[in-house]
Amino acid sequence: MKRINFLRRIAPAFILLAVIISFCACGKEIKSGRFELTGSPLTSEKKTAYAQARKFGAAQKITTSSMLELYFNESTGDVAVRNANTGKWWYSLPEKYVASGSFTPSVVSAQVICGGQIYELNSCVDANDYVKVTSEKIANGIRAKYTLKYKIDDQQTIKYVIPVEYTLVDGNFCAKIDCGGIENAGTVSDAVITKIRLLDFFGSSTAASANEYLLVPDNCGGIIRTAKATENFKDISLKIFGDAEVNNAIFGVFGVKIENDAFVCIIRQGDAVATVNAGTAKSESKYNKVGAQFDITESKTFQRKDKTYISVAGETYNGELELCYRFLSGDNANYSGMSVACREQLIRDGVLLSNVTDADGDLPMVLSVLATANTQPSKLSVLTTFEQLQDMLTHLKSKGFSNIYVRYKGAFSGSDSQSSITDIEFLKSLGTDENFNELKDYMSAQNLTLFADFKCFTDPKGGKLASKFAQNVSNEVEIMTEENGFSVKSERSVTGLYSIAANVISLIRFAKDNGLDAVSVSDASFLYSDYSKGATRDDVKKELAEEISSVSGTSRLMVQKGNFYTLKNAEVISDMPLNTSISNSACYESVPFAQLVLHGTLDYSCEPINLEMDYRKAILRAVEYGALPSFEWCYEDIQTEEPESGKNAKETESTTAKVAETAAEKEGIDKKYSYTQWANVAYSYYEKANKALGDIRDRRMTSHYKVSDGVYCTEYDDTRIYVNYTSKNVVIRGVTVPANDFMRIN
């Protein structure tokens, strides 16, 4: 829905009414409450004969599309896809059953809460009790209805009928559930489905060869090398788009590689309520598997003294859940090939634009500049005034930095704890209007860009208008906790659904009134629900996506971290993660999957290099992942402090507390935010990175792979970037790549 132009023309009093009307049909209302959990989840007796894949015959073929064949077993509900080109079968259930697995493999499963008891239902447990799968042919596939049930006693039965559509379209295999069509057919009226798993075991196995892995959406992307997994490897669970506590999944994608075949799965619908789970044959799940779980009714467990309780939301997601599988083989059956298929699908679905980055000129450097900051809990320090920023940029220009994206942070009332976007103003301590206009004129003349950094979707905790803020599943105002580079924490209340559009209008007006033609939005990097307005995470995601995109109608747009719903019409991503949240090991490693998808579509920077413990490694990683260089500096010197006596080192570790000697300190750089100390190091890197990456910003990243231990290659069509993390020179194709360095070869 396109409301932004309309809202600009009407009085603020009508904005609230327009948004209320547009969201009157949010999640379906259900019975909510807070319950004491009465025991472990209950499930019916396992029927192992229905928990593993069966062979399919020609009579069970439903349809074909682009060398793919879809099969369905009408008696059990199993589904399979065969690649006719390679002969590879992809089954919805594992080919071998493992009795010690954490739960029974199934095609569809659901978690249900009734009172204080949790029940686990799935399509393979009660298969012999009665005919539980019915089906009908539809265009390009089949629609199956799965009956999941649990008999509590002679009078009470939990039973749900879940419709699933399986189709082959344009060479894609799609599985879809219309949550609005789920039928409660049991005798217990107050039962509620909280979670649904669909094709959770698709492509699963119990053994693996050396080149096989699972792809998971952990920050930039991670792969689990299943053959190397040990019992110490823990199952992984990643909530798509995160929440106020953690966000390590910026996109809803996962994949599997088995020998010379692979698939990538894009969560096309329902990603906002999805969690990607992965395990290995050696871990708790007992299968090499990765799949999606959908929390269609949000719930949260918590402790009160010696009792465990669960809060259940009063609304459920009633839209569609859709998984889109794309299959690859041969040389394309790897995470690079998966990224190409993923990008094509995201562009087709309108999540990403098909345009390419403007590669004219030199490589931009993203420079976050601290205008002010709370350097201590009760101390606000002015670190870079308007005049000082101009002086800093003049100095950097003289060094040779020709293209700088300045992200000006903490420049508004409240500093780190910025005031509400509806009543902000520039801090007077930064200078006069004349000083600011001189800064803008200078930057314009030098072809530099000022991105003023805003917090648009959060307010300082304790705001008077409680109705403005989102309420979580526990009926409490959603709070986001932030910690700045000086270990000072602040809490912020999250904007409610009905205030998102109004806040964006305030941002657009402020930018226009102050002559700002580029803005950075730094607090859209997590997702939430607002149950005070009956809004699920999906409702909020759609509103945020539309309103963030509307900012680009009047300003150049930078977003932080890069949740994929924020990217349409964005020009730059700042602080994009180049590592996984889980430490790398023999069986787990980070890969630039998100970067493979995005490169050439928009610019993205790494996290500030000067804040890393090993800045040299951070530089190499940025080059390997095709990221813009990034630093965070200020003009005034900041004195570092030793940890207080007796204070836990973990509590005092920060970018300013000297708790460890970093690589920078070994070279005499003892002030992490000092632009004068860092300028020479930064330019030495920038000059070389500009030559390697500057003219390929508009190209697709076509491949990434490991050459040898500590040596990686990133390809852009006919251009290769080799990165050597080792302490020895490496010769590749007759060319020497120096130790701890990188080289471009055309």
Image: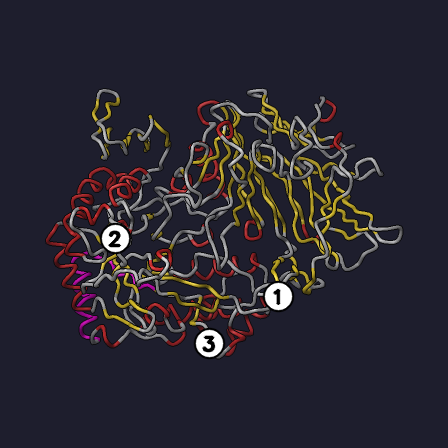
Q: Residue at x 23, y 75 (%)?
A: 429
Label 2 neighbour load within 10 Å: few <14, some 14-19, many 20+ = many
Residue 463 circle label: 3
Disc 1 residue type (three-letter): Gly
What residue is drawn where x is 57% and y is 28%? 66
Q: Magenta region, mostly helix, strand or loop? A: helix
SS of the residue under disc 2? strand
708 displayed left or right of 238: left
Question: The residue tagged with tag 3: helix, strand or loop?
Answer: loop
Counting residues from the start of the chain, the first of labels 3 and 1 encountered is 3
Secondary structure of the residue carrying tag 1 is loop
The question of residue 440 being in magenta is answered with yes
Q: Where is residue 217 drawn, in percent x and y?
A: 48, 43
Q: Judge whether residue 564 is colored magenta.
A: no
In this view, the residue in front, 241 or 141, is 241
Range of residues picked out in magenta:
433-453
Residue type, label 2: Phe
State the residue position of label 1. 534
Image: 182 above or below 172: below
How much space separates mark 3 and mark 1, taking CA atoms? 21 Å
- Where 265 sits versus 473, above or below? above
The residue where tag 2 is placed is: 631
Q: Counting residues from the N terminus, which is met first, the one under dot 3 or under dot 2?
A: 3
Dividing the picture into quadrants, the one containing residue 643 is bottom left
**Whole-percent x and y of residue 705?**
37, 30
Q: Quadrant of residue 126?
A: top right
Tell me the distance, in whole angstroms, between the alpha carbons under discs 2 and 1: 41 Å
| Cα separation between marks 3 and 2 | 33 Å
Front residue of this view, candidates 713 and 476: 476
Q: Earlier in the sequence, mark 2 or mark 1?
A: 1
Rendered location of residue 303, percent (x, y): 61, 61
Outermost left residue: 398
